[in-house]
Image: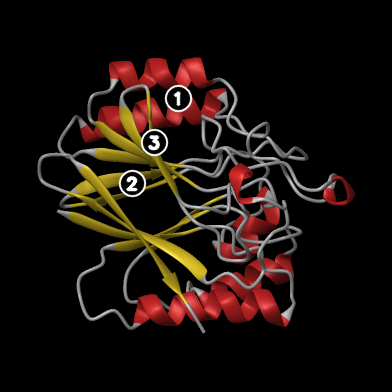
Amino acid sequence: MLVLAHISGLRLDGGARATERAERVRDRLWELPGQVDALLVTGDIADHGTEAEYEEAARILELRGGDAPFPVLTCPGNHDCRAPYRKALLGLPAADGPVNTVQVFDGGAVLMCDSSIPGRDDGALDEETYDWIEGTLDELDGAVPALLAFHHPPVAPHRPPPLPERRGRCPRPDSHRLGGADRLAALLGRRPEIAGLVTGHAHMPAATSFAGRPLVVGPGATWAPPLPWEGEQVADRDAPVGLAFHVLDDEGRLTSHFWTVSV
C-alpha cells in the first residue's frame, strides 16, 4: 500500500500570506503520527517563477539536508519557470527542458510529469515527456502500479471564468487544461499498470475519470474558487488550506480523501 499526501498551487510570491498558508499545511503534514510515504506538489509552486520564490519553497518544504519526514515530489505548473525551478528548488543545473522525475516505492511508482508550456497557461505533455513516460514504465516492467502526476487536468474541472475585471490575471482552467487528451488516452489504453492520474491547476478538489482511470484534482493552497452554481465568481482568499491524501492499495485501486487545514 502507498499513502501520498497531495498539495498544489502554493503560488509563493514573497508575501507573508502565501508563506503562512504554505507553512500551515507543511506543519500539519510534518506532524502526522501515521504513515505517509511521500508528498506530491503538483505545480504552481512559485507565482512568478523567480529563484527567490523557489528558494523559499525549498526552505518551507525542507528540500535541503533531507529534513522532511518523507520524500517531497514536485512537478511544474503554468506559473513555474523551468530553469530557476531546477536551480533553486531542485539544486540542479539550470535548463529549459521538461522536468520529469520518478520515485519508486514498494507499493507503487509516482511519475511526476511536466505539463507546462513556457509562457502559456494551458498545458501539454510534449514528445520528450511521452518518451520518458514510456521508457520509465518499460523499466518498471509492471512490477508495481504507477500514478501519473502533473499540473493540468485533461478534462474540464467546471471552474468558472473569473470576473471580467480579473481576466488576464487569473487563468481559466476549463479552457487552459491539458491539450492532446487523445494521445494521453491512447497511452492509458496501452498501459494497464497506470492506476490513475493526479493533477492540480483548478484550485479546488475534484474526482472524476479519464479514459477509464481515476482522475483526481487536488485543492489549492492559496485560495479557492466558487463553482458555477455558487453565485458570484470571486476567489475565496480566506478559505482553509486544502490538501488530499491518496491511497494506492495492493490491488492497484486508488482512493482519495480531501481535507482542510484551518487557522
Q: Is residue 128 left or right of residue 253?
A: right
User: What amino acid is at disc 2?
Assistant: Val
The reply to whether residue 67 is in sight is: no
Please tell me whether mark 2 sits on a helix, a strand or a loop: strand
Circle 2 packing at 10 Å, graded few (<14), some (14-19), many (20+), is many
Disc 1 target residue: 131
> In this view of the protein, which residue sits in the foreground, 86 or 50?
50
Cβ atoms under marks 3 and 2 closer than 8 Å: no
**In the depicted structure, whether residue 255 falls above or below residue 4:** above
Query: Residue type at mark 3?
Result: Thr
The percent position of residue 1, horizontal first and vertical second, equals 14, 53
Q: Dot 1 surroundings within 10 Å: few (below 14), some, or many (20 or more)?
A: few
Where does residue 4 sit, x and y in percent of width and height? 30, 58
Residue at 18% from the left image edge and 41% from the top image edge: 253
Mark 2, residue position: 110
Please tell me the numbered disc located at residue 208.
3
Can you name the residue that lies furthest to the left here?
250
Say which of 205 and 34 sits in front: 205
Q: Secondary structure at mark 3?
A: strand
Q: In the rendered view, would you say 219 is above or below 17?
A: above
Relative to 2, does residue 98 appear above or below in the rendering? above
